[in-house]
Image (spheres, rainbow, N blue to C red):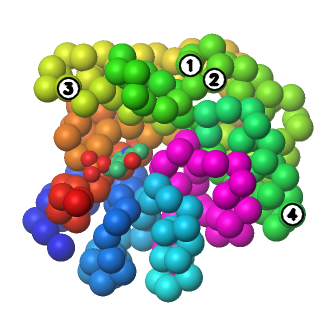
Amino acid sequence: MNDFYSEIKSFEQRKGITLVAVSKTKPNEQILEFYNAGQRIFGENKVQEMTTKYEELPKDIKWHMIGHLQSNKVKYLAPYVSLIHSVDRLSLMKTIQKEAHKVDRIIDILIQVKIAMEDTKMGSSFEEATNLIEAYLSGNYPNIRCVGLMGMASFVDDHSIVREEFRSLKNYFDTLKSGPMKEISHFKEISMGMSGDYQIAVEEGATIIRVGSKLFGARE
Ligand SMILES: *Cc1c(COP(=O)(O)O)cnc(C)c1O
């Protein structure tokens, strides 16, 4: 536990932002400290680690998958995952549809868009994301609910670059919201911002922030 948690929780309440506490690599005991303080949403980037934690920890925790997701692992998280942030290709959407149908669930997803100028970041291009949105709207994905977009900014000290990247995601969201997604009331989330840049993300319109090291301490 640390002081930052109460700070960010009051921030969450003031601004109506959802905090995903990113607990990857961190032990159950530490997750339970945040759980006991009231946190219920935790984010992980590996399916196996998340599934083990899901099995061992209280069942009212909402687990968010924030990392790159391989299609062959979808079946392990389909029964319980609360939100998948990292949908970046059609083949993955198809698999999520199939596995969600098998367990008779509707799974919420975000489409991850590559906004960073750096080459290392995952996500679909804006063009690919538009194709995913069109596919989603085709009606062939009844067990998927697309609730918004996710993006990661470059790891750079220059705030103006980070701000510009977040702004590009917000602009793209607004374009969809006034265009193809106009009638889709559940399309309303923008997941952006991590320990180093969540304040900028919130200023640029984030509705979900994903904070790890600032809450749990640095990872190995
Ligand atoms: C690890 C991770 C985070 C949290 O990173 P911190 O810098 O520790 O806050 C957020 N989003 C994604 C996709 C991550 O993999």
Mark with earlier residue (1, 3)? 1
**Whether label 4 touches label 1, CB < 8 Å:** no
Instruction: Report if residue 155 lies within the magenta region.
Output: no
Q: Name the side, left or right, on which 65 lies relative to 166.
A: right
As shown in the figure, which amino acid type bears the numbered disc 2? Answer: Ala
Question: Which of the labelled discs sits on residue 102, or is there none?
Answer: 4
Q: Are marks 1 and 3 in contact (CB under 8 Å)?
A: no
Q: Which mark is residue 156?
A: 3
- The residues bearing labels 2 and 3 have C-alpha atoms spaced at a distance of 25 Å
Mark 2 in CB contact with mark 1 (< 8 angstroms): yes
Q: Does any portion of residue 177 appear in the rendered image?
A: no
Q: Is mark 4 within 8 Å of ligand 1?
A: no
The range drawn in magenta is 58-86
Give how far apart the Cα atoms at labels 4 and 1 are: 30 Å
Q: Which mark is residue 129?
A: 2
As displayed, is residue 153 above or below residue 83?
Answer: above
Which one is in front, 174 or 163?
163
Which residue bears the numbered disc 1?
A: 125
Q: With respect to residue 188, does 29 lie above or below?
A: below
169 vs 27, left or right, is right
The residue at the point 22 percent across, 60 percent down is 220
